[in-house]
Every structure is written in C-alpha cells, then in structure tokens.
Image: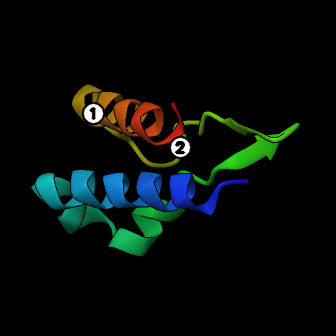
Amino acid sequence: MDSYQVRKFEFNLSEIYNQTPWLQDEIALNDFIALFPITFKNGLPQRPEMPEDFDLDRTTRLAIMVAYRQAFS
C-alpha cells in the first residue's frame, strides 16, 4: 500500500470538491472524501465504486475517475 498515492487521490478529490460549488452546499469535504475509500486486493488498488446514496453528475464522476488514474497509474 502506497500512502503517497492514497494522499494524492484524496488531494485530487479535495480539488474536485473545491471546484464544484454545489458539492460544497450538499456535503462536507471529509464526508465527500470518505465516499471513495481505496481498498487494496493483492497489493493493487481497487477503483472506488460510485456511491449509490449520493447523486453525482456525469462531469464529477469523470473527474473522480481521472483523479484515481492520476494517483494510481
């Protein structure tokens, strides 16, 4: 497990949060980051699932996937 990669992903999530005004009205930053926990299987990070109980628009979903790839590629 590489804590640098996890921190980079969390930093990228906070950037997405700060650039998306409606997210700031709906949820706190720590709660937003907690929606996307990184799990590891056989030492490899698993892509986070999109939360079913919190509705995200397409642009935000894509930004989260890009943030994951940037952190774990």
Q: Secondary structure at mark 1?
A: loop
Going by the image, does 48 lie left or right of 21? right
Query: Is residue 35 in sight in this rendering?
Result: no
Going by the image, does 57 lie left or right of 69? left
Task: Reply above or below: 48 against 62.
Answer: below
Q: Label for residue 57?
A: 1
Going by the image, does 72 lie left or right of 64? right
> Quarter of the image holding residue 56?
top left
Q: Secondary structure at mark 2?
A: loop
Kindly identify the residue that appears in the image at 33 percent across and 52 percent down: 12
Rendering coords of residue 8 (x, y %): 43, 55
Q: Label for residue 23?
A: none
> Crowding near pointer 1: few (<14 within 10 Å), some, many (20+)?
few
Q: Which residue is mark 2?
A: 51
Is 26 in front, or is 11?
Answer: 11
Rendering coords of residue 42 (x, y %): 88, 37
Kindly identify the residue that appears in the image at 52 percent across and 48 percent down: 53
Kindly identify the residue that appears in the image at 69 percent across and 35 percent down: 46
Task: Reply above or below: 24 against 61.
Answer: below
Rendering coords of residue 69 (x, y %): 45, 31
Question: Of all residues shown, which one is farthest toward the right?
Answer: 42
